[in-house]
Image (cartoon, coloured by chain):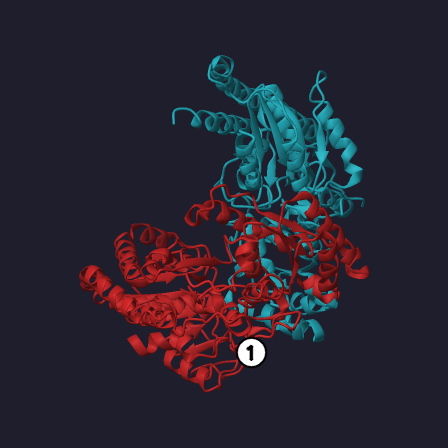
Chain colours: A cyan, B red
Amino acid sequence: MAEYMGLIEQPRFSCAIGALQSVVAIPRAVPILHSGPGCGDMVKGFYERSRGYAGGDTSPCTNFTERDVVFGGTGKLRKIIANTYKVLDTDLQVVLTGCTGGIVGDDIDSVVSEFSDAGKPIVSVDTPGFKCNNYVSHSHVVNAIIDQYVSLYEEENEPKSEPATVNLFASLPYQDPFWKGNIREYKRLLEGIGLKVNVLFGPESGGVKEWQTIPRAGFNILVSPWYGKPIADHLKTLYGQDYYWFHSVPIGANETEKFLRGALDFALSHNAGISKKKAESFIQHEIDAYYEEIDNLATFLLEFRYGLPSYAHILHDSGYVVGMSKFLLHETGVVPKEVFATDNVPEKYREDILNDLKSTSSKRKIPLFFEADAGKAQEIIRETEHKGNGIILGSGWDKKLANEKEMGFLSVAVPSPVRLVLTTNYAGFSGGLRLIEDIYGKALDGYVK
Amino acid sequence: MSKPNLSLPAVEIREIRTGSITAFDGEAKELVSRAHNGTLKDVERSFQQCAGCSITKAACMTVLIQDAAVIEHGPVGCSTCLHEYNFTYLVNSGLRGVETPLTRRVFSTNLREKDTVYGGLTKLEKTIREVKERTDANVIFVLSTCAAAIIGDDVESVCDELEDELGIPIVPIVCEGFRSRVWTTGFDAAYHGIARKLINKPSSQNTDTINVINFWGSDRFSDWFAPFGCKPRYITPFSTLKDLNHASEAVATVQACSTLGSYLAAVLEQDFGVPEIETAPPYGIVQTDRWFRALGKLLGKEDIAEQVIKEKKDKYLPRINELKEKLKGKTAYVTGGAAHGHALLSVLGELGINAVGASIFHHDSLFDSGRLENDQLNQRVEDYGNVRNYRVCSKQEYELANSLGKLHPDILLSRHGGMTLWGAKYGIPSLLVGDEHYSMGYEGIIDYGERILETIENDEFVKNLQKHAVNPYTKWWLMQRPDYFFENKENKESKAEGEVNG
């Protein structure tokens, strides 16, 4: 998989073991790290307020020492796992290996199988930091849970036995700062058109019980330009579940309507047995409510005399870059200028992403850079001049750059010590309205000092 | 135990140098005496949570140098939390008079699977060149990681070669996480690199400058040194390369925390002739007096020290006594790193609060200076008495949750992020003060005492949180002794009941 392998300034994603957060996002699951002593702290420090039930820097960990590097750490791992059951009250244990465990070649699988053979709900997955980033390893973690845990419950959960149920694969937990809110909103919307949704992560999920029912879904929904796709592909192979693929984050009315109508058509063509009429009326209701707000807002956007942002730079993952660009241009009038996909998009997905973005407008081209090295992205912004008021939508690293360039700033990506996000969503109709509140709220904050 | 040795490429780890341990359960008095008579041994745990890594400690002492760029040589994950130091730098720069603080330059060589097979040095070389090109850094630090160390990358040679070519110092810091169980080895690793490459032999005497080794706290020392005709030079956060070059030109070195500065202070004395103050940092009245006297003696200004002490007593004692009255009968638990945790225990002693227990992350048997007088826990025990339920906990939250729940003090005092949560979950008012200078000296006793009062008073939030607290720990665990998972009984009070494995 061709991707960028060079240096990275100002990291915007974690390494493979960063996907321990995907375990943390499953209610009552615990990551067990077979790694050096610092991986959990690094991950917690990157995402902030991300410890969850028993993860982050409190994850059980073998804390590799020099001796373990020389002699291996499997004995230690066995003890840590055994005692995790004594100390922590958890429903699922996922053992993740760091660089140390990975390079010294410890046989984790056989240690873990001792416990799974004894009936423990335990899974192992190889996540040494050098292997890939967390956008990629998220899929490895989820697929490992499917193969080593969900598969044990196949008998009670016949594949595709519930045609109107879907498994949703969208926001990456914690890597998307709005994951909790987005997942809640996707669930609400999809339930609105008559589907039952397994969201798998976060407080709206039913925890491991919900995971066990993954095979039952009639089809799956993937909202992502590329990350998470291996999960949908894997489920297609395993259980014959087709998937509806929406390539970017649907923000605001245009894209959310498109997303829902697409999901509805897909469901109907897969005999989900849901009512088209009811679904249509739900969608129309959502659209009406949205435009009631926009109608009120338009006067302000058009008439506010003291200046509002007229263009934006975006630094985010490719799903957000495309989703936000479409939204900003069509639903706020803010023109996306140079935008940066910082998620190290594999080469083979880039053309599709570029085409998706191109479809935004027949009049203008939005310059998109695939730039995992965010320091480089900042250099490009630093050297670019545009007329009017600009705003940067990016991570905490970008706030100072925005100040330097006398531009507005909204923190929308990790890492960010300058914004607190709890359950806010940017996906969906309500997400679009919230993004409008945030962008223009920030702009108004600048007046009357 | 051994002396600092700058001829080695990597700093010797604390386990070897300072006889440091990461597990103990007993009384403070016992820990101090065993540390001093050399009978302290470390213990393994058969259950552990993430213990923390040297790299972040090395990073905070380098990333915050004004004109530095920092390269993490490893997979990208090992640099991801360093953005927090960028935030610290931009927020606290005002405390140190940095008027236009610049975004920190943090890079990762982004080692990948192929590099673990063929080595990562080509990537490192490329990165160093690019960093030179991209930044105006006057010095580049290269931090090593577990991956780079296991594959055997010779980081030092690459740094040395490029240093000549690029014309700025390029300093390798050996700080991979698996080397030491004591994360503070990371501070030493950074200082070792700095001392080897950046600190010059003194070219002149500088009789009005005192090195202060600290983090990023407020500037308390300017006022304190002024009567002695001296000013502080804070190292290493917010210093410049030039400041570090001249760190050898100082009349003395003092520290905010004996654990933090142990190595650098000793090196400055041993290799550069700058004397380290012969006593522990000034926390609590008794120690503050001792500290001013030691400073006066070192500067040959004993009379000024006496005068300062008298003025401070006149000014602050009445308020301190009022606070003592209000805090009478209160109990507290302390958690944090050594030796700042010891400092807080001394402040509690001064305020008359009963310290019912402590979970401190590690313990150094003897600091690099070799002086017992620098031992802050010893000083606490001698000045204010023993602390029962004294634990060395290696940042193990499960042990803290266990110990704290049983002792249920009136307040939890913490000096490390993440640990206050357990106070709140138990409905115990909890206080974390990030500024390491906040509780120092006479002023500190008042400031800190007032915060303690205020925190105990405002308990509505924690009482509400307690009602809804999520607890991942089993009932069984919370009823065991906190040292249950210590693998040998060396540092346990008595043998734990039951089998460890099952």
Q: Is residue A174 above or below residue A292?
A: below
Looking at the image, which is closer to me, B6 or B349? B6
Disc 1 crowd rating (10 Å Cα; few below 14, some 14-19, many 20+) is some
Q: Position of residue B76 (x, y in %)?
A: 67, 52
Task: Give the structural element (helix, strand or loop) at label 1.
Answer: loop
Q: Is residue B271 left or right of residue A243?
A: left
Query: Could you say which is closer to the camera, residue A267 or residue B114?
Result: B114
Q: Is residue A135 visible?
A: no
Position of residue B311 relative to residue B490, above or below, is above
Amino acid type assigned to the residue bearing label 1 in the image: Lys
Residue at the spot 62% in from the left edge and 32% down from the top edge: A314
Using residue B225 as the reference point, say whether residue A152 is left or right of it. Answer: right
In this view of the protein, which residue sits in the foreground, A190 or B392?
B392
Say which chain tag 1 marks: B
Query: Which residue is painted at 54% across and 50% down in the image?
Result: B66
Q: Residue A86, how many percent across, how many down?
A: 52, 69
Q: Which residue is mark 1?
A: B3
Quadrant housing the C terminus of chain A: top left
- Which quadrant holds residue B299? bottom left
Residue A183 image offset from top left, x and y in percent:
57, 39
